[in-house]
Image (cartoon, rainbow, N blue to C red):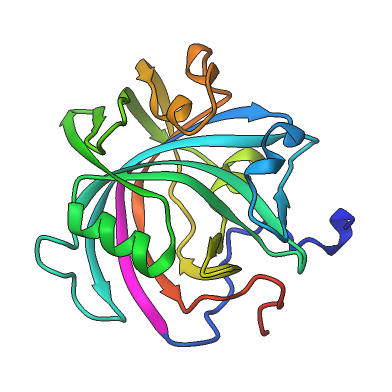
Amino acid sequence: MSDAGVEPVSAEPPRLSGPVMMNQSWRDLTFLHWAVRPEDVAHRMPPGVRPDTLHGLTYVGLIPFRMVGAGIGRGPGVPWLGSFLETNVRLYSVDATGRRGIVFLSLDADRAAVVAGARIAFGLPYRWARMRYARDGDVHTYDARLRRPGARATSRVVVRSGARRRSTELDDFVSARWGLHVRAWGRTSYVPNRHEAWPVHDAEVLSLDDELMASVGLPGLAGRAPDHVAFSPGVRTDFGLPGNASRPRRP
């Protein structure tokens, strides 16, 4: 499929065509990305989906943040279970209909019940981890250690956030994503979401020691500086119901 059939990158979200399945707030989020060749990660995509590219490259993301007040439908956040720490490793995707999305290789969280529920209900690769987030002025520290039996991986990310900036082409490419692609129950689904444009801030990596990317088959990336770094205070998002990835979103 040529790029002419791919939806444009836009910070303006399309509307959700159906009911809201859940709502969440993502807070104190750091974007770290490494450029890779699309052929190096194409085999990690579910059927019907390929790596999305910007100027011939695609990106691997390491994204630590705080989940706050996740709720069912448009309802209030579920007490305790609705707020937790998460770090995900992700790729950027486009399906046969031209919809851009995200493919998660792992989502590590410190709520065992959330991990179990998301794996069973949605087929998402959640893993249970011991996690910690601390803030000291503009310095944000994220720690994670997998608790899954047989898995040994840790991650420590320390960044200093700076002033808000006008989003770059790469900022928009990795953040203006209005759905995710996931393989579950024998088919590839597209789960749409909607949120305001990310407020993007400058950020500086003070320390990075990560094994989470290597734990999902991407060794060596953490040994070099990321190609993209940004911080955001966060957004609130609504998720729609999953649909078949081979069917275009209704206008």
Q: Quadrant of the C terminus?
A: bottom right
- The residue sitting at 67% across, 28% down in the picture is 36
Q: Is residue 52 above or below residue 1?
A: above
User: Taking 31 as reference, is 156 above or below it?
Assistant: above
Residue 9 at what x, y percent from top left? 68, 56
Q: Which residue is outermost to the bottom? A: 18
Q: Position of residue 131 (x, y in %)?
A: 19, 36
Outermost residue on the left side: it is: 79
User: x, y percentage for residue 119?
Assistant: 36, 59
Q: Is residue 20 left or right of residue 69?
A: right
Q: Residue at x 73, y 60 (%)?
A: 8
Q: Main secondary structure of the magenta part?
A: strand
209 and 199: which one is in front?
Answer: 209
Name the quadrant containing residue 168.
top right
- Quadrant that contains the N terminus: bottom right
Total numbered labels placed on residues in the image: 0
The residue positioned 54% from the left and 31% from the top of the image is 33
Q: Residue at x 45, y 63 (%)?
A: 196
For residue 179, side relative to residue 141 (left or right): right
- As for residue 232 lying within the magenta part, the answer is no
Against 233, is 236 above or below? Answer: below
Q: Which residue lies most toward the top here?
A: 223
Q: Image quadrant of residue 127?
A: top left
* Left/right of residue 187 with respect to residue 21 in the rendered view: right
Looking at the picture, how far across and down is residue 138, in whole percent? 25, 28
Which region is colored magenta? 20-30
